Amino acid sequence: MDSQSIAKTVDTPEPPAAPSNRARRAVPLIAAALAVTVVAGLLYLRPSMPSPASPSTRPSPGPSILEPRYRVEYDFVTRSLGWALVVDQVTQPSRYWVFNTTDGARRWTLQKSDSTMVYGTFQISFFNPYEGYYSLVGNAAFRTSDGGTRWTEVKLPSKALGMAWFVDPTHGWFHGDSDFESTADGGLTWRALPPPPAVGPLIAFRDRSLGWVASIADDAPSTVYSTRDGGATWQPHQLPSDAFGKPFRPAQGLSLLPDRGVMVVLLDDTAYTSLDLGASWLRLAPPPAGNTYMSIAFQDPIHWWAMRDGDLFKSVDAGQTWTHVALQLDGWLYFPTVLDARHAWAKLQSPGPQLSGSALALTSDGGVHWTYANVPRPG
């Protein structure tokens, strides 16, 4: 990657006719069937900016755009190697495509195409350059051990509407309306677990043992739960009380920080982090203007990025203070995922009808400049 915009659009291969979450970053939040994340307006932070950063000029030409009818999830394991899962939202059963890039999204190669019933949520995640999986709410999950050349279907334990996810090539869970089960052999066999103690889809595991769950129920107290035995038993953790002593404080977000730590976002526009397995909790300062807690990207447990409106802020103290870094003038909403201090990729979404669809951008200088990348082309 360089800091200049891509000058030419490289055509992607035509797909054949159908049918045919990583430890180094925060473990993805797993949504159960038909779950809708409630996004509330959050408080604004006015960070001190001794010398405002110079805005970055609008890259030219414009980005490669994926049509609004398609939703896409990306996962990059290096600045050049990544995958994309694209779902057609118009058709039902939904057509979907899996693509791979080895050159930083200059070209995308179709690996798989199929059709299935998809009910909202889906994800693709690789643990290393070879082993990964994708999963869709609607009882479809596949895994690979050769970088996606071949995909093997995961036999899910239930026909109930739910979703499967893995923390490594062998250990995973299936969570649905009435089912909660785990596997230690890549989905060949499953073991039933007691239902989690909290209602809703906010559940995440760091490894085969440590997991967290928070409740979205209206009558939920400000309590989160952790497990250290893969979900067999759970321990409660009381969050600090707010100034008004509200008895019910449901959650709307749960994120695992890289390597260690957890962040819980409540519906009352507050958020808390713990770096010691829930023994203590720290209330976060409000996020930078234009951002929400759930749009924050994590470089490591204390270095965070926030860039929703194209205005990049960074924190070096786990979200307590923020420093302005750069401003993009292209009008897109940026949702970055950080690989390291210099490299990140961002899914770009349209803030309105003037910019329809979604796009992709990459940075190699810590987010000061971004390069538009090509998006995969389903067909």
Image (cartoon, rainbow, N blue to C red):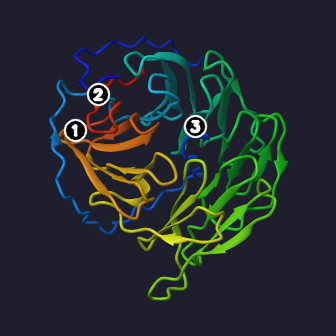
Mark 3: few/some/many CA within 10 Å (<14, 14-19, 20+) = some
Q: Secondary structure at mark 1?
A: loop
Circles 3 and 2 in contact, beta carbons < 8 Å: no
Q: Is residue 159 visible?
A: no
Say which amino acid is labelled 1. Answer: Leu
* Distance Cα–Cα, label 1 vs label 2: 15 Å
Image-quadrant location for residue 276: bottom right
Circles 3 and 1 in contact, beta carbons < 8 Å: no
Q: Which mark is residue 355?
A: 1
Mark 1: few/some/many CA within 10 Å (<14, 14-19, 20+) = some
Say which amino acid is labelled 3. Answer: Met
Asked if 211 appears above or below 46 in the picture, the reply is above
Taking depth in this image into account, of 211 and 121 the one nearest to the observer is 211
* Distance Cα–Cα, label 3 vs label 2: 32 Å
Q: Which residue is mark 3?
A: 117
Asked if 251 appears above or below 173 in the picture, the reply is below
